[in-house]
């Protein structure tokens, strides 16, 4: 009986997640504008897409805020 309740709960959560995902609009032009603003290039290639990122890191270490253009990373990783 507990297994059936678990299945029902999981099914309800999955349904809710799918409905939430499908209810949002995709705005490709907005995504392209934001990518271009931060120097990210997305190109179609055979079998998928190629994503080119700028040399400078977009995020500070342990931060989720996009960094300002003039700031440098506090950690210097050695180049190989």
Image (spheres, rainbow, N blue to C red):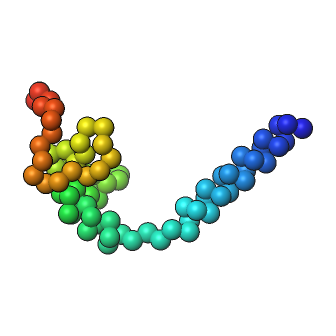
Q: Is residue 66 left or right of residue 14?
A: left
Question: In the picture shown, does residue 51 fall above or below 35?
Answer: above
Front-most of residues 38 and 69: 69
Q: Looking at the image, can residue 64 be seen?
A: yes
Q: Residue furthest right?
A: 1
Q: Looking at the image, can residue 46 be seen?
A: no
Q: Residue at x 17, y 54 (%)?
A: 68
Q: Position of residue 29 (x, y in %)?
A: 32, 72
Point out the image quarter for the N terminus.
Answer: top right
Front-most of residues 79 and 77: 77
Q: Residue at x 44, y 69 (%)?
A: 26
Question: In the picture shown, does residue 79 fall above or below 28?
Answer: above
Point out the image quarter for the C terminus.
Answer: top left
Front-most of residues 54 and 49: 54
Question: In the picture shown, does residue 16 fall above or below 56?
Answer: below
Q: Position of residue 23 (x, y in %)?
A: 56, 68
Q: Position of residue 40 (x, y in %)?
A: 22, 56
Q: Position of residue 67 (x, y in %)?
A: 21, 50
Q: Is residue 9 left or right of residue 68?
A: right
Front-most of residues 4 and 60: 60
């Amino acid at each position: 009986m507990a297994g059936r309740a678990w299945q029902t709960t999981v099914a309800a959560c999955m349904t809710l997640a799918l409905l939430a995902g499908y209810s949002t609009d995709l705005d490709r032009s907005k995504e392209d504008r934001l990518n271009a603003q931060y120097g990210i290039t997305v190109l179609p290639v055979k079998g998928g897409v190629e994503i080119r990122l700028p040399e400078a890191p977009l995020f500070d270490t342990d931060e989720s805020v996009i960094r300002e253009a003039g700031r440098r990373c506090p950690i210097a990783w050695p180049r190989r």
